[in-house]
Amino acid sequence: METLIYNGSSASTSEVLKQLVRDKYTQIADQSKEANETSCCGAGCGCSTIDSAIMAENYQQLEGYVADADLGLGCGLPTEYAHIKEGDTVVDLGSGAGNDAFVARSLVGEKGKVLGIDFTERMIEKARENAEKLGFNNVEFRQGDIEKIPLSANVADVVVSNCVLNLVPNKLKAFAETLRILKPGGHFSVSDIVLEGNLPEGLQKDAEMYAGCVSGAIQKEDYMQLIEIVGFKNVQIQKQRRINIPVEILQQYLSSSELEAYTTGQKGIFSITVYGEKPVPCCEPGSGCC
């Protein structure tokens, strides 16, 4: 698998990747949740042997869940770990049809606000249609690039994102933008796909079929380092889950010895949910608060 450059990709490469994402998720927006779950995370690549729950987790038990907004595209439940409070302003990066945004709304209540940002126009249309049907007036969806979020600085108490940042070519810029829009003392909780160890070449090729859910993934260590580089503090992994690719898929690409090493070893593809806080600037010297 070709490694995507996450902190300095050329403009041409970046735009090609973004167009691929836009085209793919425009198609996904009009597919059912069942179709997305059984087609390599929505890619439509005909992976009929893949367990429908290989990436996604079950939202149905969460307050605020809206079935029409659930396209089965996530890889975690970031709102469960985001410490969202009543009255908060929450920003959902890569909001899709509104799944996480509507769950967040149930937590912020009528006094709070939820802003969803998505790169794909059709996803924004679908999310707005869902919000209008539900009569929500404190949930807003805007089209925008996560590398240049269309929001002012210091507006969000909490940022959430679900299996989206791995699709962004310049992850360093995306995390820097996340820091910018958070209020001092605010925090994020994002679920994403990362790698541990160098995967066998055949498996890397197969992993790309998982709809960009893996094709843009980087090493977990590099992912965590990017978050700290931009200035987040108290960075921690809240949850980690191995993505188990079915043996019948693995057998097509790995020798018996490679298969045993992969299934019994530590390297592989993982879903992680990560938390980080925006520091509060120190006040003037001598005031006694630092």
Image (tube, rainbow, N blue to C red):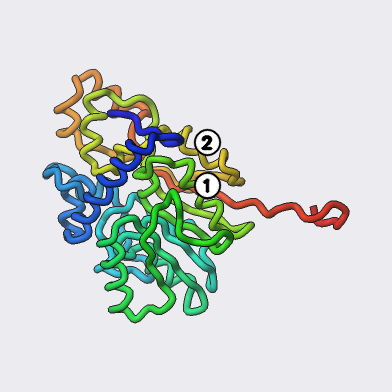
Left or right placement of residue 91 versus residue 167 in this view = right
| Quadrant position of residue 245 | top left
Looking at the picture, does residue 30 appear above or below residue 203?
below
x then y, percent, for residue 227: 52, 42
The residue lying at 35 percent from left, 40 percent from top is: 14
Q: Mark 2 points at which residue?
A: 225
The residue where tag 1 is placed is: 176
Q: What element carries label 2?
A: helix
Q: Which amino acid type is marked by label 1?
A: Ala
**How far is mark 2 from mark 1, CA to CA?**
13 Å
Whether residue 77 appears in this view of the structure is: no
Q: Residue furthest front?
A: 12
Per the image, label 1 sits on a secondary structure element best described as: helix
Tell me the quarter of the image containing the N terminus. top left
Tell me whether circle 2 and circle 1 mark residues in contact (CB < 8 Å).
Answer: no
Question: What x and y, as percent, mark residue 172?
Answer: 48, 41
Name which quarter of the figure residue 129 lies in: bottom left
Residue drawn at the location 35% of the way across and 26% of the way down? 265
Of marks 2 and 1, which one's residue comes earlier in the chain?
A: 1
Residue 26 in sight from this viewpoint: yes
Mark 2 Cα shell of 10 Å, populated few (<14), some (14-19), many (≥20): few
Query: Can you name the residue that lies furthest to the right here?
Result: 286
